[in-house]
């Protein structure tokens, strides 16, 4: 009996030590699916963690670790609640009652999942020598011509408007499923995007991007012309039914346009290109770029787009409004040391 109580006590302590995930509902659902796939690979904590680590990509390991942590923690909470109810119903019940056996099975399940949660929480990251170089979409875009967005859009008769909006705003495909609103207000093009990766502490629930009506960008002018053509005073909403279908047609269009390319063009290429254009414009702060892409942290500067891939010419919005202020992430120790070394070297040269 004391051993069972120790298992319950340890499980509660573990839940306190490992906080709940702040991910949104869609991400959590993905964690559950990933956990179900991993569970088919083994039923002991060690075999599940071994299955999760059976890859060379660090990002995949952390994704699987998050999936196991979320699913295990959620299940332990429910099992603890279940055994609490069962334990209260057993007050004064004889030790040989079959319900005590049921309670014991519940406690053993708690112990099993607590062991898994503890194991994955303490598991080390993949050793450097076993890691595979990260494959980034922005690196795949190298070599694309300056007019690649226009050429892709021309090949998408059914998704041309959605692709145009993605190209100008850098919105996520999921945000096009929700719907992106376009309007002309006070001599400006105004685009309202509802964030698809927003939680209580992260992301932007909504953001507005503004362009002047005399923008130099042909892409921006295409959107302005579209609104004018529709003759809608209150604007229009651009929406797609399925993000995966949209991704599929964009990928297929890229393959038809450049059959010799080894890397694919996807909707996220529009997002990376938009970020690169914003950086290259020189008119937007890091915080504004982050807000424009739906972030509330300025890590965008190292995540999306490469400055050298950007094109000038009015694609970047003239101003941005967002639901939340953008937080500035403090540079790491390594980053600060690198900056200090550069300053020292510059001082020696002067």
Image: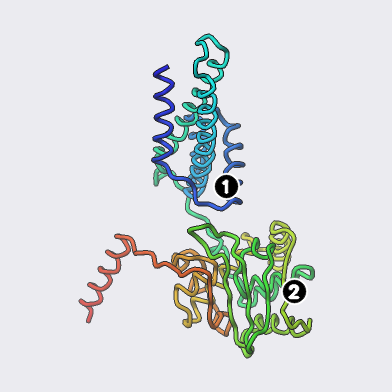
Label 1 or label 2, whichever comes before in sequence order: 1
Q: Which secondary structure, mark 1?
A: helix
Which numbered circle lies on residue 41? none
Label 2: few (<14), some or many (≥20) within 10 Å? few
Name the one closer to the observer, 315 or 232: 232
- Report the front residue among 211 and 75: 75
Judge from the rendering whether residue 264 lies leftward or rightward of residue 136; answer left or right.
Answer: right
- Vertical side of 306 occupied by 96: above or below: above
Numbered circles on residues, count = 2
Task: Please identify the quarter of the rendering in which residue 170 is found.
Answer: bottom right
What residue lies at 46% left-to-right and 35% top-to-bottom?
117
Disc 1 to disc 2, C-alpha distance: 37 Å
Q: Which residue is mark 2?
A: 154
Which residue in the protein does label 1 denote? 28
Task: Give the number of the mark in front: 1 or 2.
Answer: 1
Identify the residue at horizontal 56%, vertical 65% (top origin). Answer: 205
Quick one: which residue is furthest to the front in this view? 92
Task: Decide if residue 227 is on the left or right side of residue 52.
Answer: right
Indicate the position of residue 46 as horizontal and vertical percent values: 47, 29
Secondary structure type for disc 2: helix
Judged left or right of residue 328, residue 225 is right
Classify residue 142 by image quadrant. Answer: bottom right
């Amino acid at each position: 009996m004391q051993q069972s109580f120790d298992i319950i006590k340890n499980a509660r302590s573990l839940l306190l030590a490992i906080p709940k995930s702040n991910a949104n509902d869609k991400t959590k659902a993905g964690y559950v699916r990933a956990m179900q796939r991993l569970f088919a690979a083994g039923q002991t904590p060690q075999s599940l963690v071994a299955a999760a680590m059976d890859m060379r990509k660090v990002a995949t390991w952390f994704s699987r670790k998050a999936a196991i942590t979320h699913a295990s923690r959620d299940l332990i909470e429910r099992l603890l609640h279940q055994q609490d109810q069962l334990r209260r119903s057993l007050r004064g019940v004889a030790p040989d009652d079959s319900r005590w056996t049921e309670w014991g099975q519940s406690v053993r399940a708690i112990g099993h999942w607590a062991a898994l949660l503890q194991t994955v929480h303490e598991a080390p990251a993949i050793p450097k020598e076993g890691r595979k170089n990260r494959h980034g979409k922005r690196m795949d875009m190298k070599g694309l011509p300056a007019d690649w967005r226009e050429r892709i859009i021309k090949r998408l008769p059914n998704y041309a408007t959605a692709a145009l909006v993605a190209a100008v705003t850098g919105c996520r495909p999921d945000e096009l499923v929700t719907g992106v609103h376009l309007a002309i207000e006070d001599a400006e093009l105004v685009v309202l995007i509802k964030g698809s990766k927003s939680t209580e502490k992260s992301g932007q629930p909504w953001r507005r991007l503004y362009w002047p009506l005399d923008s130099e960008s042909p892409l921006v002018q295409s959107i302005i012309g579209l609104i004018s053509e529709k003759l809608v005073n209150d604007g229009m909403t651009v929406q797609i039914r399925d993000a995966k279908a949209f991704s599929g047609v964009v990928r297929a269009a890229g393959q038809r346009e450049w059959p010799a390319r080894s890397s694919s063009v996807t909707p996220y290429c529009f997002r990376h290109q938009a970020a690169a254009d914003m950086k290259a414009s020189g008119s937007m702060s890091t915080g504004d770029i982050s807000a424009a892409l739906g972030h509330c942290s300025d890590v965008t500067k190292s995540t999306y787009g490469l400055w050298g891939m950007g094109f000038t010419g009015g694609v970047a919005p003239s101003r941005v409004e967002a639901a939340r202020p953008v937080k500035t992430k403090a540079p790491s120790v390594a980053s600060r040391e690198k900056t200090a070394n550069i300053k020292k070297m510059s001082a020696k040269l002067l």
